[in-house]
Image (tube, rainbow, N blue to C red):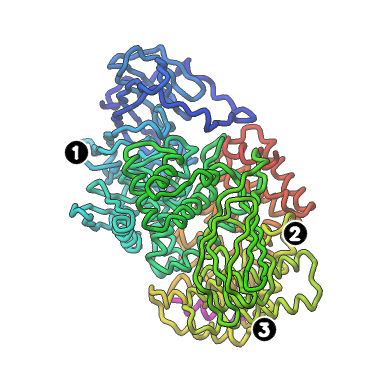
Amino acid sequence: MDIASRPSEPAENPKVADAAPPPQAPPSIRREDYLPPAWLVPEVALDFRLGLEETRVASRLSVRRNPEGNGTATLRLNGDQITPLTLRIDGQEVHDWRMDGPDLLVALPGEAHQVEIETCLNPGANSQLMGLYASNGMLCTQCEAEGFRRITFFPDRPDVLSTYTVRMRGDKAKFPILLANGNCTAQGEDADGTHWAEWHDPWPKPSYLFALVAGELVANHATFTTMTGRTVDLNIWVRPGDEDRTQHAMDSLIASMKWDEETFGREYDLDLFNIVAVSDFNMGAMENKGLNVFNTRYVLADPETATDADYDAVEGVIGHEYFHNWSGNRVTCRDWFQLSLKEGFTVLRDQLFSADMGSEAVKRIEDVRVLRIAQFPEDSGPLAHPIRPDSYQEISNFYTATVYNKGAEVIRMMRTMAGPERFRKGTDLYFDRHDGQAATCEDFVKAIEDGAGLDLRQFRLWYAQAGTPQVGVELEHKGTQAILRLTQSVPATPGQPEKQPMPIPLRLALYDRDRGEHSGEKLVVLDKDSDTFVFDGFARPPVLSINRGFSAPVAIRFPRDNADLVFLAAHDDDPFARYEAMQGLVVQHLVAAVSGQLDEATRAEARHAIGEAFAAIIADPALDDLMRGELMILPAETYLAEQLAVSDPGAIHAEREGLKRWLGRELAGPLRSLHDRAAAVAYARDAAARGARKIKTQALTLIAAGDPAEGARRAYAQYTAADNMTDRQGALMVLASLDAPEREEALADFHRRYEGNALVIDKWFSLQAGSFHPRVLEHIRALARHPDFTMGNPNRVRALYMAATANPDAFHHESGEGYRMIGELIRKLDPINAQTAARFVPALGRWRRIEPVRAAQMRAELERTAAVPDLSRDVREQVSKSLG
Ligand code: PHE
Ligand code: ZN
């Protein structure tokens, strides 16, 4: 099929409905309404005539009636912002098709037909970055969840699996590299300066996994030999000039492939694996079969431009997308309500991978911190939804911390209850049973139940109920017995007023406070509203360590003595529990302080306990620096706010900063020695040197809080001496919050030094937008007018405005200026990139949990946004739910 020889399109197609504005309340799609597809598409052939301003697409679908469908003769092909130029059935042009909104409907008389459709696209004008779009002169696609329908008409749903053959032709000078899924089967060039390639993917896949890339790219190439001895070619494609920053990504890819063989028995199934880095991308990366497309920020890394955290993120996302080849691609989702089937499981897999590559303890602490900062607030707000939602208006809004991170926690609980070996039997059974299928969360649970030998009947509630369970703890000591009373309650969430108790696996230990030891960890499962567990053999009241390793994604309510927390912070042999004790000590104090419940004596006593614990951590020779750094991190303000029904972000910020100042002064000596010791460690990528860099900036932050002049001096010295981005960014972060002359100098130097490096300039924007400088709002306004700022690039938008939203001094400024700024951003960005715009709504949606003056200002911004007539479905859903 060669679209170049087609007759030209009709000027106007009368059957295409006028583009009507979306209705005020977009319809909800409901999980219980699922119906199998009426028609299947076993094979797809696509032919692209590529151009930046005009790309012609000719598709040929072999369609066949689904014996499990409802028997309708009507074939529904989804479309979005496209019109059919021609439509042929079995080779004959037909005219009796019609549009139903954006979809194309055509009646088919028989059991199987060939349907050919042509469409024409303008990738250069596609600012939504869904479907086929242009990025830096290159063409690429993004189809998850519903982007394929912006390329051609198709039953764009994940339970329609097809084998794809893709031909593409384009100008050889503009698009020297032509890539699609699977293997390249043929290529050639013509005298007119064009060339072409044909790709075939033997594995049936849903349309959301389709991908195509064309552009000027260079590859870092390597090979991998699989567990059965097959050789796989690996390429990481980047723009010329970036190839020196791809080695860490390649090492991570090879490590992922090996790890998945060893840990889950999963072997790669094609001879080629391509990764392409693009700088305009809505998300982190995409697992298209054999052709992963990545945001550059998760590919490019070298010591000069990437921090240690950036290195970890690259490793984690490379692993995540690679692991999707089995958890997502070989076994895919039946419908989008099952999104956590692939995402929750794949997040768990990438978490376990990163834990094995580095420090398991540190990784667990980081993952829990992300859950608490991003998922807990979601679960307690107007956008709360179960990990398997029951309805949605726009599926893009459900790529959430709940579906991803809580989804991973839910599967991790099954693993905790089964143990790793039995869990592996469950996942083996899952992959065996459902290979090649579009499965459901229920299929997954059933496979784990059967394979691991667990009874998960009640556990299924974790898929259905939203809200973070609150677990109340009481410990009584009587005679030689320790009596543990546990209660649970799952809070009401939108649409779910009543909840049932869920099985909550809690790893716990009881410490003898004299010996500083316990006699073995236990696993209790709380599966009722309340329950009592009795432990014998304690002459004195033991110290309880509970939810060790964060075995369940719940909030523990256990008011306790500072002395017990200090004990656990110093002695607990579970590193997470040790971190948790430290957090508890600080959370308990700061929550009391912002609630105004503190007299000076109590405040002094709590600060003293925290100071002692900090000093012990700084001095503890048994701790490695990476772990020491975790223990020194103060609880995030969003997490503190979670502890209160209604909070004053200004008060939380002031109290937390007050504690930092106090610690900086109280521990000035030890912190300076720590900073000096860390500064003497030379750059290396090993754990010891990374740990040194981590505590270096942490020490610096506290030093600067206690003594801004000393902080500025040390930060400037760290900045100028830096031979790596971790130190440089850390120093600049500290300077950015100080009203010191060194600040402007360092910021100007940073911009000059990294001009033209988009990922580093993103950091320059973020650091300033995230700073606690008194004039931060003014700075943000100025940055929005900076020549380097653009609304067209999601990384740049997020760099400036996500950092601003996370900054209490900016977003929650008492003038309401921060809320107005984010409201304006949402309204301005919505027509350009609705998906990215919608991601800013939840911050305003928190208004019910904020003190009344600010709450009214936040609500006003949501109302102002709701009043915009032609809002996208993405923003409309988030705003209406946030107000509702
Ligand atoms: N499926 C991708 C991932 O989690 C995320 C993604 C969703 C990317 C939608 C782009 C668009 O790996
Ligand atoms: Zn994913």
Residue 43 versus residue 586 in the image, above or below: above
The reply, left or right, for residue 166 in relation to residue 740 is: left
The chief SS type of the magenta part is: helix
The residues tagged by marks 1 and 3 sit, at their Cα atoms, a distance apart of 70 Å
Callout 2, which amino acid?
Answer: Asp
Q: Which residue is mark 3?
A: 666
The reply, left or right, for residue 406 in relation to residue 39 is: right
**Residue extending farthest front:** 479
- Magenta stretch: residue 712 in it? yes
Locate residue 706, reporting x and y percent: 66, 79
Residue 697 in sight in this render: no
Q: Quadrant of residue 92?
A: top left
Q: Which residue is mark 2?
A: 648
**Helix, strand, or loop for circle 3?**
helix
Q: Is mark 2 within 8 Å of ligand 1?
A: no
Q: What residue lies at 58% left-to-right and 58% top-to-bottom?
A: 372
Q: Quadrant of residue 563?
A: bottom right
The residues tagged by marks 1 and 2 sit, at their Cα atoms, a distance apart of 64 Å
